């Protein structure tokens, strides 16, 4: 008897801020809606608020993911932990046994997958409630090979908790990649216009999370005060445009680092930047931080005072692309990538163990300037068969590699987090 050839599933995560672009896709008849008979489940229970165990697990996941990627790559790392988390969360709903246990342990070690699902539903609803002049959009989609019988329960769970849509598609068609990339470009307003170059015959399912963030500063920087100065990159000194301001803002003094937090309009979303003391590299400093403690600071819970700050920070644009297989395997999810061990049988209507994750791709984009911030990220997972304000002015010059993040203080989630090693002007 010939061994069954495993097919491929791709899971794509997206987080982006952008403008709309439509590409020509394959005919609608080749992209059938699989949600026609799936509606909201009766009696569905979601969290009215975030569960601390899940939130803490997310902090650990975000910290571990940035630390792992920054150890392998040394210039301008930027990830959206939320994007990766949502795509892996959708995938975990198709996992069984040891594969499910490993994925849940990486995503939320002290909570169940059911708790994770409920929290995701709360987060998505909360993030959809946007502030003035702020755009936050999150979309999840599932693309299924047209002759593959995907489990209806798998689609139902991801529709209920992740608000995912699902369509069938012919991955053998050369236009399939254009259709998927068109969805990505539209969902990210063109900041990220593709996640795959081509599809292949061994692909069965692709799950995509697309998120978009764009907002203006509550108090914009004056363009006339922006001027060139030296940024001390790892290997060289370079001249870059720096924004300058002296104003009252949230000042951070935390574990041999100083930093600032600046609100976007509406004061729900905040930009954070932290730079360690001279002689201490940002990667070494970050590695030794407790995730819960660090993100507690970034949510304004301690080590922050209101102060008059003389600030200089570079304008920058950063794009980043990486495969996360190595990182996620080292974090404890290795079994999901092994053809002879992975169990994603809950994705299949027949309950067959014929899928494994062959790749996890992540793309991201961020632009920070005098007006505000635009950020984006894409992740694709491919599965194949088998107190009182101080009186003195605080001066902070971000002229060395530093950590930055975009924080939502309602959900207390870091949406984007990165290390700027060498700024590129917008």
Image (tube, rainbow, N blue to C red):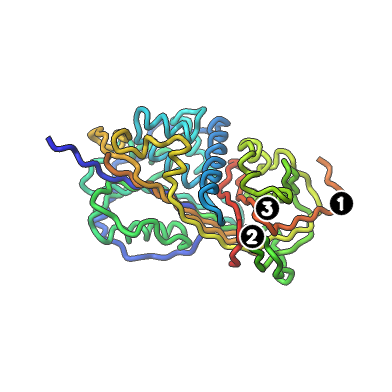
Q: What is the x, y in percent for residue 258? A: 73, 48
Q: Which residue position is annotated with label 2? A: 233
Residue found at x 50% / y 30%: 109
Q: Residue at x 78, y 47 (%)?
A: 306
Identify the residue under disc 1: 392
Q: From the viewer's side, name the closer residue of 396 and 165.
A: 396
In the rendered image of this protein, does residue 95 appear above or below residue 250? above
**Which residue occupies the extreme left position in the image?**
1
**Apparent side of residue 212 relative to residue 243 in the rendered image (left or right):** left
Quote the CA–CA distance across marks 2 and 3: 27 Å
Residue 411, picture quadrant: top right
Q: Is residue 255 visible?
A: yes
Q: Which residue is mark 3?
A: 263
Q: Work out which quarter of the rendered image holds the C terminus and state it.
A: bottom right
Q: Nearer the viewer, mark 1 or mark 2?
A: 2
**Residue 373 figure quarter:** bottom right
Q: Which mark is residue 252?
A: none
Under tag 2, what secondary structure?
loop
**Quadrant of res 151:** top left
- Find residue 101 and report its horizontal and vertical position in percent: 41, 29
């Amino acid at each position: 008897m010939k061994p069954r050839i495993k097919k491929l599933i791709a899971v794509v995560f997206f987080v982006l801020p952008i403008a709309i672009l439509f590409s020509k896709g394959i005919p609608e008849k080749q992209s059938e809606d699989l949600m026609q008979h799936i509606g909201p489940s009766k009696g569905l229970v979601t969290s009215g608020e975030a569960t601390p165990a899940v939130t803490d697990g997310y902090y650990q996941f975000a910290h571990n993911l940035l630390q792992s990627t920054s150890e392998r790559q040394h210039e301008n790392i930027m990830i959206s932990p939320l994007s990766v988390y949502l795509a892996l969360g959708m995938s975990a709903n198709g996992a069984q046994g040891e594969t499910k246990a490993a994925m849940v342990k990486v995503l939320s070690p002290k909570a169940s997958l059911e708790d994770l699902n409920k929290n995701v539903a709360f987060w998505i609803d909360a993030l959809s409630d946007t502030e003035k002049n702020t755009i936050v959009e999150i979309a999840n989609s599932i693309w299924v090979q047209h002759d593959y019988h995907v489990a209806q329960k798998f689609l139902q769970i991801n529709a209920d908790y992740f608000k995912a849509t699902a369509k069938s598609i012919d991955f053998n068609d050369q236009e399939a990649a254009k259709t998927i990339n068109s969805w990505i470009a539209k969902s990210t307003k063109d900041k990220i216009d593709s996640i795959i170059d081509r599809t292949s015959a061994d692909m069965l399912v692709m799950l995509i999370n697309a998120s978009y963030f764009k907002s203006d500063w509550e108090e914009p920087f004056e363009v006339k005060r922006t001027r060139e100065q030296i940024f001390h990159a790892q290997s060289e000194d370079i001249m870059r445009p720096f924004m300058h301001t002296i104003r009252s803002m949230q000042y951070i003094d935390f574990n041999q680092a100083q930093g600032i937090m600046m609100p976007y309009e509406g004061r729900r979303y905040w930009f954070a930047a932290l730079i360690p003391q001279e002689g201490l590299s940002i990667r070494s400093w970050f590695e030794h931080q407790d995730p819960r403690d660090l993100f507690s600071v970034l949510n304004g819970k301690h080590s922050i005072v209101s102060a008059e700050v003389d600030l200089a920070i570079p304008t920058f644009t950063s794009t980043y692309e990486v495969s996360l297989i190595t990182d996620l395997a080292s974090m404890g999810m290795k079994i999901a990538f092994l053809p002879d061990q992975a169990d994603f049988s809950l994705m299949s209507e027949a309950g067959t163990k014929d899928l494994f994750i062959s790749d996890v791709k992540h793309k991201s984009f961020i632009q920070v300037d005098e007006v505000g911030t635009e950020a984006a990220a894409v992740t694709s997972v491919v599965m194949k068969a088998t107190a009182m304000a101080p009186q003195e002015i605080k001066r902070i010059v971000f002229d060395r590699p530093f950590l930055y993040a975009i924080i939502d203080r309602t959900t207390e989630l870091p949406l984007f987090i990165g290390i700027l090693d060498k700024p590129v002007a917008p």
